Amino acid sequence: MGIEDFIRKVAVQTAVYWGAPVANGYGAMTYSEPVEIKCRWEDTVELVRAADGEEYSCRAQLLVTQDLSINGYIYLGELSDLDSDQADSPQNVIGTYKIRRLDKTPLFMSTNKFVRKVYI
């Protein structure tokens, strides 16, 4: 079993993911439709450096099976937990966190298989 297979096997938690917001042309931001993803969510508190170089206190680390966007949002739960206002904007959901960093490491001798770790 390869590391990607292992990550898929341990990624048994469901999370809701919104991609990074984009300007809507009217001074506000809009988010992509939320989607459910599988992850392994590990609550932790540690000092890490965000993608922009700023140090912050990380609340959790997630192993994920796909690329996620910096400044996207993630919520540990299911789409069915959210009402329509919450699905439209992750900032309306208690317990939703901004993705501050994504580490994507290629496997040895591979150009298309990766280990992805997200920090919130």
Image (tube, rainbow, N blue to C red):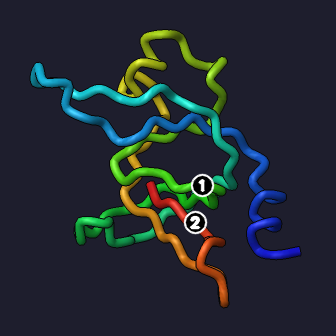
- Compared with residue 6, is residue 107 higher up or lower down, i.e. above or below? below
Estimate how packed mark 2 is, as few (under 14), some (14 to 19) or many (20 or more) residues with alpha carbons within 10 Å: some
Q: Residue at x 81, y 67 (%)?
A: 6
Q: Nearer the viewer, residue 62 or 33?
A: 33
Asked whether, in this view, residue 44 is left or right of residue 93, the answer is right
Residue 109 lies in quadrant = bottom right
Whole-percent x, y for residue 65 in the image: 65, 56
The amino acid pointed to by label 2 is Arg
Residue 81 lies in quadrant = top right
Whole-percent x, y for residue 18 in the image: 46, 35
Q: Of tags 2 and 1, which is closer to the observer?
A: 1
**Disc 2 and disc 1 in contact, CB within 8 angstroms:** yes
Asked whether, in this view, residue 50 is left or right of residue 42, the answer is left
Estimate how packed mark 1 is, as few (under 14), some (14 to 19) or many (20 or more) residues with alpha carbons within 10 Å: few
Please, what secondary structure does the residue beneath circle 1 have? loop
- Compared with residue 19, is residue 10 higher up or lower down, i.e. above or below? below
- Going by the picture, which residue comes out furthest to the bottom? 109
CA separation, marks 2 and 1?
Answer: 7 Å
Where is mark 2, residue-wise?
Answer: 116
- Compared with residue 30, is residue 53 higher up or lower down, i.e. above or below? below
Instruction: Report the disc number at residue 66.
Output: 1
